[in-house]
């Protein structure tokens, strides 16, 4: 049993390394097997496909972040502070795992998407809307459509990672420069959100 767990952990670590290096589309099961130091047949014994393997890596990533956000949204603090916490954490997650947004979009637009959608933190959007309504009644945010705000927030976070090849060419940047730009973007987004929400 211990051997199986250590082998699975080795595979997941290798998969994350390859996904980070080559992106989801550029990753091959053979490359993951090579990095893990196992043969491809053993890799397929543990994970039938690249999609299944990525879902396991994806589950670990979101479980490391979204439960923390859930805790923050249950706290009695200003809505804007909750959103700033989300921006900081979510952008760091995407900086470390830039392949996540494209994988999610490709998966939720595929035919067999119902099971995967259940893995996403959809319930968080309800908490965001409820928290916004509390602050609206207190007068600490201006009146707006919470659904539009959530879509704008997600779009501002995710778009650069989806459009990375275009942005690299547009700004004549390399990966290091892009990462620095995304790090700076955290403060930029916090400023935008403040401007959007302030009464």
Image (cartoon, rainbow, N blue to C red):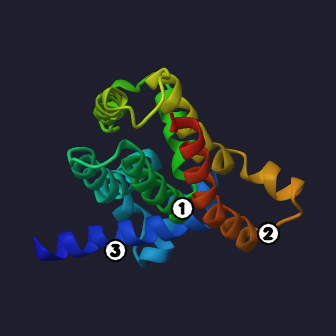
Q: Residue furthest left?
A: 1
Return the x and y of residue 166 as percentages of the image width and height.
81, 49
Estimate the spatial distance between the alpha carbons at disc 3 and disc 1, rounded to whole Å: 14 Å
Residue 19 lies in quadrant: bottom right
Above or below — where is 86 with respect to 19? above
**Residue at label 1?**
19
36, above or below 98, in the image? below
Instruction: Report helix, strand or loop for mark 1.
Output: helix
Q: Give the side of residue 128 with respect to residue 25, left or right.
A: left
Residue at horizontal 35 percent and vertical 24 percent from the top: 114
Q: Is residue 144 left or right of residue 172?
A: left
Sequence order check, earlier mark of 2 and 1? 1
Q: Earlier in the sequence, mark 3 or mark 1?
A: 3
Disc sitting over residue 10 in the figure: 3
Q: Position of residue 100 (x, y in %)?
A: 51, 50
Marks 3/2: CA–CA distance: 30 Å
Alpha carbon distance from label 2 to label 1: 18 Å
Depth order, front residue of 44/179: 179
Q: Residues within 10 Å of mark 3 (few under 14, many from 20)?
A: some
Residue drawn at x 49%, y 40% as measured from the top left: 104
Name the outermost residue toward the bottom: 37
């Amino acid at each position: 049993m211990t051997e199986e767990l250590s082998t699975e952990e080795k595979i997941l670590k290798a998969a994350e390394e390859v996904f980070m290096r080559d992106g989801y589309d550029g990753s091959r099961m053979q490359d993951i097997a090579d990095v893990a130091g196992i043969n491809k047949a053993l890799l397929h014994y543990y994970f039938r496909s690249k999609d299944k393997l990525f879902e396991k890596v994806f589950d670990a990533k979101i479980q490391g972040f979204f439960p923390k956000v859930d805790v923050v949204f249950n706290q009695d603090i200003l809505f804007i502070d909750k959103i700033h916490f989300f921006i900081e954490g979510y952008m760091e997650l995407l900086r470390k795992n830039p392949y996540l947004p494209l994988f999610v979009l490709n998966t939720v637009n595929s035919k067999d998407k119902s099971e995967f959608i259940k893995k996403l933190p959809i319930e968080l959007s309800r908490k965001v809307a409820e928290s916004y309504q509390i602050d609206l009644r207190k007068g600490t945010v201006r009146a707006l459509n919470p659904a539009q705000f959530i879509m704008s927030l997600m779009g501002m976070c995710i778009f650069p990672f989806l459009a990375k090849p275009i942005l690299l060419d547009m700004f004549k940047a390399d990966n290091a420069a892009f990462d620095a730009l995304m790090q700076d973007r955290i403060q930029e987004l916090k400023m935008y959100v403040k401007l959007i929400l302030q009464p």
